Image (tube, rainbow, N blue to C red):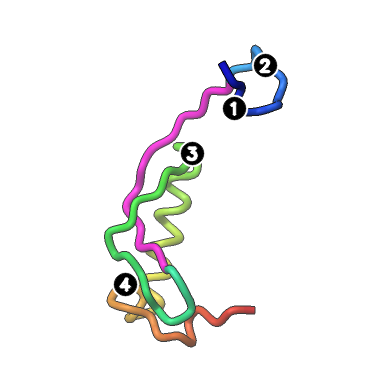
């Protein structure tokens, strides 16, 4: 059978406590977005990320309904 990678085998198993949260995902600087986006996050960071989302949405009335291109200017 052909090996799919050249990485050495490791006996190390990493375990992460994750959860999926609902968060709008912006695709580009033109405001294209998915209002029903889902993202996997570490459970320990979930509350902080959702708090930041609420703070951002309360500051910008167009954050969820569609953001203008000026909100997401590329650098």
Residue placed under numbered mark 4 in the picture: 64
- Quadrant holding the N terminus: top right
73 displayed left or right of 35: right
Residue placed under numbered mark 1 in the picture: 4
Percent position (x, y) of residue 65?
28, 76
Q: Which of disc 2 and disc 4 is earlier in sequence? A: 2
Q: Which mark is residue 10?
A: 2
Q: Which mark is residue 58?
A: none
Q: Nearer the viewer, residue 39 or 17?
A: 39
Q: Which mark is residue 42?
A: 3
Q: Which residues are magenta?
A: 14-26
Distance from disc 1 to disc 3, alpha carbons, whole Å, reads 28 Å
Q: Nearer the viewer, residue 34 or 20?
A: 34
Q: Which of disc 4 and disc 3 is earlier in sequence? A: 3
Distance from disc 1 to disc 4, alpha carbons, whole Å, reads 42 Å
Q: Secondary structure at mark 4?
A: loop
Q: Would you call the spot at circle 3 few (<14 residues within 10 Å), some (14-19), or many (20 or more)?
A: some
Distance from disc 3 to disc 4, alpha carbons, whole Å, reads 23 Å
Q: Secondary structure at mark 2?
A: loop
- Quadrant holding the C terminus: bottom right
Instruction: Give the residue displayed 41% in from the left and 62% down from the top.
Output: 53
Instruction: Give the residue displayed 33% in from the left and 57% down from the top.
Output: 37
Number of disc labels: 4
Q: Which of disc 4 and disc 1 is earlier in sequence? A: 1
């Amino acid at each position: 059978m052909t090996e799919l990678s050249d990485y050495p085998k490791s006996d190390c198993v990493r375990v992460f406590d994750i959860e999926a949260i609902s968060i709008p995902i912006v695709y580009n600087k033109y405001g294209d977005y998915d209002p029903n986006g889902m993202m996997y996050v570490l459970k320990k960071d979930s509350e902080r990320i959702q708090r930041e989302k609420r703070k951002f949405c309360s500051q910008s009335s167009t954050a969820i309904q569609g953001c203008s291109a000026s909100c997401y200017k590329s650098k």
